[in-house]
Image (spheres, rainbow, N blue to C red):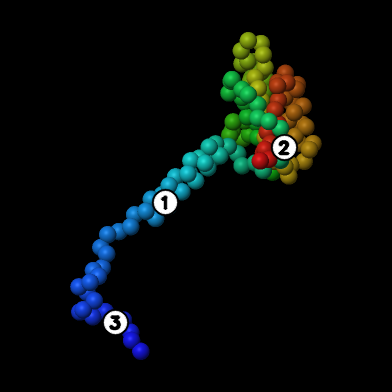
Amino acid sequence: MAMHLPSGRSRGRRAPMADINVTPLVDVMLVLLIIFMVTAPLLTAGVPVNLPDSRAKPLDQEKQPTEISLDAEGRIFIAKEEMSFDTLSARLDAIAAAAQGGEPPQVYLRADRKLDYGQVMRVMGELNRAGLNRVALVTVGED
């Protein structure tokens, strides 16, 4: 039975490779770069809300809309600022009064899917009372 043992004779024929193979490192770095490039735009939402699914197409917009979010506990946020339901009507009146050109601003309403329908309708009623009738319900699109 013959075994190949490192000996003095085999050293002369084959020397150990001293170069580092950087191809796997470059592959891993490119994959990480792609992952960060894909996930970075998804991190723009301020209030964590579990949105319902929808097959609707995204809206075209030219102005920055007002975002109103309702989380799973029923807390109300306007552009990441938490407020109570009592102060909501005054804030919506101020948003409607600041509208330019007589056209009410676009409002995006984001509500958690676990939230009671009545709470969403209370906020929509306040939006209607303030004259903010251009309301879009934000959902997660199916691919």
Q: Which mark is residue 97?
A: none
Q: Is residue 95 visible?
A: yes
Nearer the observer, 69 or 1: 1
Asked if the residue at tag 1 contacts the one at tag 3, i.e. Cβ–Cβ closer than 8 Å, the answer is: no
Q: Which numbered disc, 3 or 1, marks the residue closer to the eye?
A: 3
Q: Earlier in the sequence, mark 1 or mark 2?
A: 1
Q: Quadrant of residue 8?
A: bottom left
Q: Residue at x 77, y 31 (%)?
A: 122
Q: Quadrant of the N terminus?
A: bottom left
Mark 2 crowd level (few <14, some 14–19, many ≥20, 10 Å Cα) = few
**What percent of the width, then of the height, locates residue 68?**
65, 31
Asked if the residue at tag 2 contacts the one at tag 3, i.e. Cβ–Cβ closer than 8 Å, the answer is: no
Amino acid, disc 2: Ser
Q: CA distance from mark 3 to mark 2?
A: 67 Å
Q: Residue at x 52, y 41 (%)?
A: 38
Amino acid, disc 3: Leu
Q: Is residue 83 visible?
A: no
Q: Which numbered disc, 1 or 2, marks the residue closer to the eye?
A: 1
In what element is the residue under mark 2? strand
Judging by the rendered image, the residue that carries numbered circle 1 is 27
Judging by the rendered image, the residue that carries numbered circle 2 is 54
Judging by the rendered image, the residue that carries numbered circle 3 is 5
- Check the image and report above or below for 117 versus 136: below
Mark 3 crowd level (few <14, some 14–19, many ≥20, 10 Å Cα) = few
- Check the image and report above or below for 131 versus 108: above
